[in-house]
Amino acid sequence: MKKILVSQCLYGGCPVRYDGKSKAENDERFLRWKAEGRLIPVCPEVFGGLTVPRSDAQRRQHKVVTRQGVDVTEAYMKGAREAVRLARAYNVICALMKEKSPSCGSNMIYDGSFSGKTVKGEGVTAELLRKSGFRVFSENQINDVQSLIDEEEGAIR
């Protein structure tokens, strides 16, 4: 059975987001993968040493900064490196990450102005995972993840 790296906030059960909340995914396929033990939950921010709750942060080009202007890039990079390490250790088929996150966003992120505007882009963990050869999807692309699983595991049978 192929494993999937997944944002802890989507996995649920342990609030890790900056606001101390969760964004647990309830798609029936996701819940089935969870029950099967297919999902490997990660929170790069927590892996990087950040607390829950914490100040919200957004990506500004190659840096991640909090609303107060504090540069937290190194914590985000430390967590990204740990996520890649786990992806390799579990030989995951892909990563399913929380969209808009400065860490996990795979297609869209907040623009860095803290105004609620989003732009095309990716978080630091999604970027590092892709550079390391992993496919990265958002929670809006569960159909694509299912297709990838069917393709990969169908070839094994």
Image (spheres, helix red, strand yellow):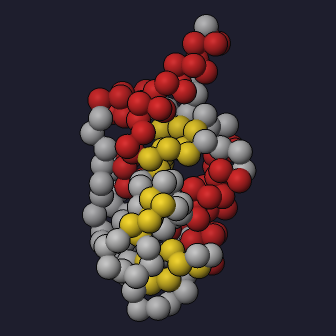
Judge left or right: residue 81 versus residue 119.
right
**Quarter holding residue 117:** bottom left
Residue closest to the eye, 64 or 15: 64
Q: Residue at x 55, y 86 (%)?
A: 71
Q: Position of residue 121 (x, y in %)?
A: 52, 62
Q: Is residue 48 above or below residue 55?
A: above
Residue positioned 33% across, 61% down in the render: 15
- Residue sitting at 48 percent across and 61 percent down? 120
Q: Please tell me which residue lies in front, 14 or 95.
A: 95
- Residue that protrudes farthest toward the right in the picture: 132
Let me know if residue 6 appears in the view: yes
Furthest residue in direction top, as rendered: 157
Q: Quadrant of residue 76?
A: bottom right
Q: Is residue 51 left or right of residue 21?
A: right
Instruction: State whether residue 122 is above or below residue 72.
Output: above
On the image, the x and y values in percent for residue 50 come to 48, 75
Asked where in the image residue 31 lies, by quadrant, the reply is top left
Query: Split into 4 quadrants, where in the image is the N terminus?
Result: top right
Image-based side of 134 in relation to 100, left or right: right
Residue 156, position as x, y percentages in the image: 64, 12
Return the residue nearer the eye: 3 or 145: 145
Is 16 above or below relative to 11? Answer: below
Residue at the (56%, 45%) spot, across then down = 136
Q: Residue 61 location in percent, x, y?
A: 58, 76
- The total number of labels drawn is 0
